Amino acid sequence: MLAAVGCHAAPDTGKAEAPAGQAHTEPVTLTAADGVKVYGTWYRAEHPKALILLFHQAGSSSGEYATIAPKLVAMGYSAFAIDQRAGDGMFGENRTAKALGHDAGYLDAKADLEAALAWAKDRKLPVLLWGSSYSAALVFLVAAEHPGEVAGLLAFSPGEYLGSDTMVKAAAAKLRVPVFVTSAKSPEEIAAARAIAEAVRVAGTTLFVPQEGGVHGSSTLIPARDPAGAEENWKAVQAFLRRVVP
């Protein structure tokens, strides 16, 4: 049931993606179930086909998606990027972590993802979860615990980062939605991503193995960080999104 693909994930028609309106941004503040304030940015497409919730990697912030979210908007998807409590200033200030004032663990940040999902329900759109590194592990847990609320999942460099060797794979086995998994080009990351992707029991699950470039997390889509691979990685993401939320 696992579709492993290389760099040419879909044929290139030669046609540019039609713009779907400008990205109108709006700050949003959420309150997680434990009372923590979670800060985010809503990128609004004019006529969105879906809402993609964007979660960053360790040491990072919602700024990880400053170039990615506008591209998603141009493809016709609204996006919401949050500052999780487990993060820092790799891509700019993490407002949630700064306000919290102390270090938080990866599993603690699960409450932030759940707050974003609860907020997304009111948008009345198909919702996809998108995770990077540790949050690519968390999205499997959140999707498994909220069946029927998530239309699909994208995981960039997932692994068993949450204190257990099986927690993420066990959650992956419970999913009933389309899943896209990719990683950096290193053998270790590919093996970790493959193990999780193979646990998913949904036909058409995509494991994208980069043939050129390929870096850790969602940075694999940022040309400045992955000049050799970003373009082909975007083709794979676009192919998945067109299939799941056309």
Image (tube, helix red, strand yellow):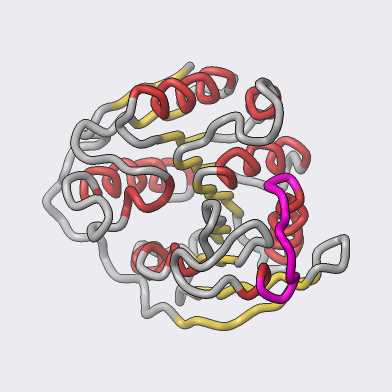
Q: Is residue 29 magenta?
A: no
The foreground one among 123 and 196 is: 196
Q: Quadrant of residue 153?
A: top right
Task: Locate residue 43, reporting x and y percent.
Answer: 50, 74
Q: Is residue 183 above or below residue 200?
A: below
Task: Locate residue 31, reporting x and y percent.
Answer: 80, 70
Q: Quadrant of residue 52?
A: bottom right
Magenta span covers which residues? 98-107
The foreground one among 58 and 52 is: 58
Residue at x-position 35% and y-position 36%? 184
Residue at x-position 36% and y-position 45%? 237
Q: Is residue 100 magenta?
A: yes
* Tag count: 0
Q: Looking at this rendering, what residue extends furthest in the left direction?
A: 14
User: Secondary structure of the magenta portion, mostly?
Assistant: loop
The foreground one among 150 and 159 is: 159
Q: Is residue 68 above or below residue 183?
A: below
Residue at x-position 45% and y-position 34%? 181
Q: Is residue 195 above or below residue 47?
A: above
Q: Quadrant of residue 177?
A: top right
Q: Seen in the image, is 127 located left or right of residue 117?
A: left
Task: Locate residue 182, reporting x and y percent.
Answer: 40, 35
